[in-house]
Each structure stands twice: as C-alpha cells, then as structure tokens.
Amino acid sequence: MMIENTLMQALGIEIVEVADGKVTATMPVDERTRQPFGLLHGGASVALAESVASIGAYELVDKENEAVVGLEINANHIKGKRDGTVTAIGTVLHRGKSTMVWEVKIHDENDQLICISRCTIAVIKLRK
C-alpha cells in the first residue's frame, strides 16, 4: 500500500484487509485524530472512510489504464469517541464502468456504530 507521506500515514490509518469489494482499516483516536473538545474529529472519520473506499475501488479497476478519485462523500456521525481505535469496513454497493458507490461503517472496539458514510468514486482513464 502506498501510504508513506500521505494523510493516511499522518492519521495512523492501517489497512487490515483488502478483498474483492471489501476493505477493512483501523485508525487510532488520539492527538492526531481528535477535535479540540477531545472527541474523534468528523473530518478524520471522513478521511478514513474515503481512504477505505478509494483503496477498495482501486483494487477493482484495470490499474494499467484506469485510476480512481473521490467524487462525493457524506457521513453521519452517530456516536462520539474519545480514545482507543476505530475500525472501518467498506463494501462496494455499485460497481459501474465510470463510477462506484461504497458504504463505509466505522465501529469502535465494542462494535458501537461511530459513523456511517457513503462515498462515490469516479473511475477515470489514465492518459498515456
């Protein structure tokens, strides 16, 4: 995985599993990912969700001729979290030729739903 010198590395995101149409990743809830009131920052959750969706989408395209980029993302922040680790599980809902839609659920260690996100990914042709 190409995460060195990226936002993923800065936030401590680790990829746990990459399967066909499914990606699992973890992220710590610490000084890198908290907002000023001590809770997991919603933007960190969104970065985790988009990372999972983008990696999953990339695994489904022809890497010699195509790339993927985030087109749209939304997130509902369900429950606050102050410390520990969150786990994101992304699954592809729609796999088209030019777009994909991914659902990403973020849970804590007690399987409490922290955030749910939907991410639309554009599949673009590489210029050669």
Image (cartoon, helix red, strand yellow):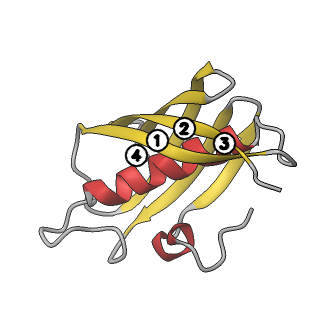
Q: CA distance from mark 3 to mark 1?
A: 11 Å
Q: CA distance from mark 1 to mark 4?
A: 27 Å
Residue annotated with mark 2: 121
Q: Residue at x 83, y 56 (%)?
A: 128
Horizontal side, residue 41 vs residue 15: left or right = left
Q: Secondary structure at mark 3?
A: strand
- Horizontal and vertical percent for residue 95? 65, 22
Q: Secondary structure at mark 4?
A: loop
Residue annotated with mark 1: 71
Horizontal side, residue 26 vs residue 97: left or right = left
Residue annotated with mark 4: 108
Q: CA distance from mark 4 to mark 3?
A: 34 Å
User: 13 and 75: which one is in front?
Assistant: 75
Q: CA distance from mark 1 to mark 2?
A: 5 Å
Q: Quadrant of the N terminus?
A: bottom right
Q: Secondary structure at mark 2?
A: strand
User: Which circle's residue, 1 or 2, is located before the other in the chain?
Assistant: 1
- Horizontal and vertical percent for residue 104? 47, 35
